[in-house]
Image (cartoon, grey):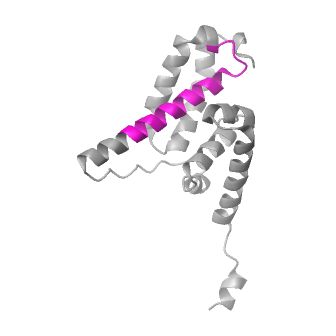
Amino acid sequence: MAGDALDFESWYELEHPRLLASLLLATGDLELAREAVDEACARTLARWSRVGRMDAPSGYAYRVAINVAHRRRRRAALEQRLLARRPPPLPTVPGPAGEAWAVVRELPPRQRTAVVLRYVADLTEAEIARAMGISRSTVSSTLADARRTLAVLLAEPDPEVEDHHA
């Protein structure tokens, strides 16, 4: 749906839950996801006269949210180094599809973000490319790499193979 067909309130009501769920799954940190989404929505509102006319206003919001999350993570890492203390453990975040999302959290950050934007946010490869600031072909190869990794991680061991090695 083209952005100019919606006012900000309608867009927000439609997109905010997906945006928050996507950032939560991509970051594994509910507080960081909330902060990044809140900032992205505030910036989207401030620029709605321009963003609302875009073909995919959500792509803009995802890009801002991802950038905010990355910046806050980098800042927190710097603070940790400067304060020379151990970072607190990340909270366990249950995924919407159970164990499969626990495995997705094991992917490298770029692959995890691409998977979440594709399969949770339901963005196209072109929209993901814009949101992540990478080329569409990089998105395609990143998703292919992620699917291969997930296939290995989700594969059940073959009992026949295990018995022969015993």
Nearer to me, 86 or 25: 86
Q: Is residue 87 above or below residue 130?
A: below
Q: Residue at x 51, y 49 (%)?
A: 94
Q: Quadrant of the N terminus?
A: top right
Query: Magenta segment: does it hold 30?
Result: no
Q: Position of residue 8 (x, y in %)?
A: 60, 12
Q: Point out residue 15 in the picture as x, y percentages from the top left corner.
A: 61, 25
Residue ID at (48%, 38%)? 70
Q: Is residue 52 magenta?
A: yes
Q: Is residue 79 above or below residue 86?
A: above
The answer to whether residue 18 of the structure is visible from this angle is yes
Q: Compared to 162, does 39 lie above or below?
A: above
Q: Residue furthest top?
A: 49
- Residue 33 seen from this side: no
Left or right: 19 in relation to 148: left
Where is residue 57? Give x, y as percent.
65, 20
Please tell me how many numbered marks the rendered image carries: 0
State which region is magenta. Answer: 51-75
* Dominant secondary structure of the residues highlighted in magenta in the image: helix
Where is residue 48, by image quadrant? top right
x and y percentages locating residue 166 in the rendered image: 62, 92
